[in-house]
Image (spheres, helix red, strand yellow):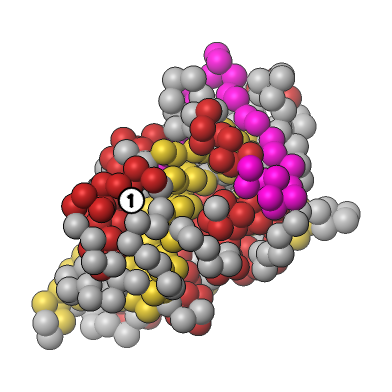
């Protein structure tokens, strides 16, 4: 058995503090700093790559514990993603319709649009402005109910069976009646910036209802963004809890997974591979050492998994039902929507055994399109052996998701055992 500091309440607090990918990085960085990690900047020369370090690139973060690391040490990497589907501000967001002030929003990723209706929404993200030394940016969080996308009344729908939601016409949010100040200026003022001074932004909405344990026996965690902050949190606790070994434990969290990972900071970028190369160089190694290290290393791609839905059991592969509270999930797909292969599967099975937690094996129905993860992209970009895993959840991509409280510590313990090697 492994001792873990991960709890469902801890995950809830993590999610509530992290409404955007940039905030996930800030939340993780604060925990790392408290544990003696220090930040490296990609523009600096890395003379101190050994030890406890982390790097941030936009909404992505890579951290490692290189205490006592020797040249030739393998890397054991837990990967995940920091972004979640949501509704984001357009470039000309200020509108008026039916005598009301509205804000034009655009879905990001595969947002389950019906779940964003009739929720009190806050705003978060980052604002870019001209500072003394060029473009700078500030994070902003508005945890107040400033926006709302109201549902159409049932009496106005065509057949009282609900309405088809058009992402262009039906997800703009109400902000007021008379409100005339540009919404970006209003947000800028909240961030202490001058009106008109904001030159670029990545602003997104979040549901304000706090995470909480629910059920008659409080066996579920009800929270937004479990996909994939469930992995960000479990991976962070695993990194902080992992005992030092021969291998270097690493956490790699990427932005933009929900839109395909193709960006300067997504899993298809050079972020992970360049950090690994510079880490080896920081230990005194050259190109040959770097290539040997990568060949000896392995990555667990962590992302949430579909628990079997009690109202829709027919939507799941009948021989691979996944139980809420049943432990970590190994994800396998013959068409490589997941990167798992036999050797990677065995590595994760060993980690679960070492952690003393059960392992569930997931296969998607062959007649339904299977989602993907950073796993196949990371494997392609880096050549790392990669295995796709996750924790069970329901209501994936809803603005409000659900998972088993007991799965949080079991998932983190398995990741911890994997990192320890
Ligand atoms: Zn995901």
The quarter holding residue 346 reads top right
Kind of element beneath mark 1? helix
Question: How many numbered discs, if any?
Answer: 1
The residue lying at 82 percent from left, 58 percent from top is 218
Q: Relative to residue 386, is residue 398 drawn left or right?
A: right
Q: Relative to residue 61, is residue 242 drawn left or right?
A: right
Q: Which residue is mark 1?
A: 293
Q: Where is residue 168 drawn, in percent x and y?
A: 35, 39
| Magenta span | 350-375
Q: Where is residue 178 drawn, in percent x and y?
A: 39, 69
Q: Magenta span has 363?
A: yes
Residue 73 shows in the view: yes
The residue closer to the viewer here, 4 or 309, is: 4
- Name the image quarter holding the N terminus: bottom right
Q: Where is residue 94 drawn, in percent x and y?
A: 30, 59
The residue lying at 17 percent from left, 73 percent from top is 45
């Amino acid at each position: 058995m492994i001792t873990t500091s991960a709890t469902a309440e801890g995950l809830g607090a993590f999610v509530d503090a992290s409404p955007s990918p940039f905030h996930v990085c800030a939340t993780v960085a604060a925990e790392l700093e408290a544990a003696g990690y220090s930040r490296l900047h990609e523009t600096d020369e890395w003379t101190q790559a050994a030890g406890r370090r982390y790097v941030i690139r936009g909404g992505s973060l890579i951290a490692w514990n290189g205490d006592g690391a020797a040249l030739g040490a393998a890397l054991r990497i837990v990967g995940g993603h920091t972004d979640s589907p949501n509704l984001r501000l357009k470039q000309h967001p200020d509108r008026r319709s039916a005598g009301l002030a509205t804000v034009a929003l655009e879905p990001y990723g595969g947002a389950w649009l019906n779940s964003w209706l009739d929720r009190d929404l806050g705003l978060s993200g980052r604002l870019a402005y001209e500072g003394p030394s060029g473009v700078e940016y500030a994070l902003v969080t508005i945890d107040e109910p400033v926006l709302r996308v109201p549902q159409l009344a049932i009496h106005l729908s065509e057949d009282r069976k609900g309405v088809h939601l058009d992402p262009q016409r039906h997800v703009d949010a109400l902000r007021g009646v008379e409100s005339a100040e540009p919404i970006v200026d209003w947000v800028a003022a909240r961030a202490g910036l001058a009106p008109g001074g904001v030159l670029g932004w990545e602003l997104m909405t979040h549901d304000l209802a706090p995470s909480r344990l629910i059920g008659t026996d409080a066996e579920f965690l009800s929270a937004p963004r479990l996909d994939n902050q469930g992995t960000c949190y479990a991976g962070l606790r695993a990194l902080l809890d992992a005992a030092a070994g021969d291998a270097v434990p690493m956490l790699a969290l990427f932005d933009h997974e929900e839109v395909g990972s193709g960006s300067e900071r997504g899993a298809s970028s050079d972020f992970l591979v360049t950090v690994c190369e510079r880490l080896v160089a920081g230990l005194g190694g050259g190109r040959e050492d770097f290539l040997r290290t990568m060949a000896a290393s392995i990555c667990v791609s962590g992302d949430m998994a579909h628990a079997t839905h009690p109202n829709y059991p027919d939507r799941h592969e009948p021989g691979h039902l996944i139980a809420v509270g049943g432990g970590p999930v190994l994800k396998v797909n013959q068409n490589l929507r997941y990167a798992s292969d036999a050797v990677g599967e065995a590595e994760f099975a060993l980690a679960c055994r070492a952690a003393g937690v059960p392992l569930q094996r997931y296969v998607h129905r062959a007649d339904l399109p299977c989602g993907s993860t950073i796993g196949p992209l990371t494997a392609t970009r880096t050549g790392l052996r990669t295995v796709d895993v996750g924790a069970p959840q329901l209501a994936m991509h809803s603005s409000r998701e659900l998972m088993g409280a007991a799965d949080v510590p079991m998932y983190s313990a398995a990741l911890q055992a994997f990192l320890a090697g």
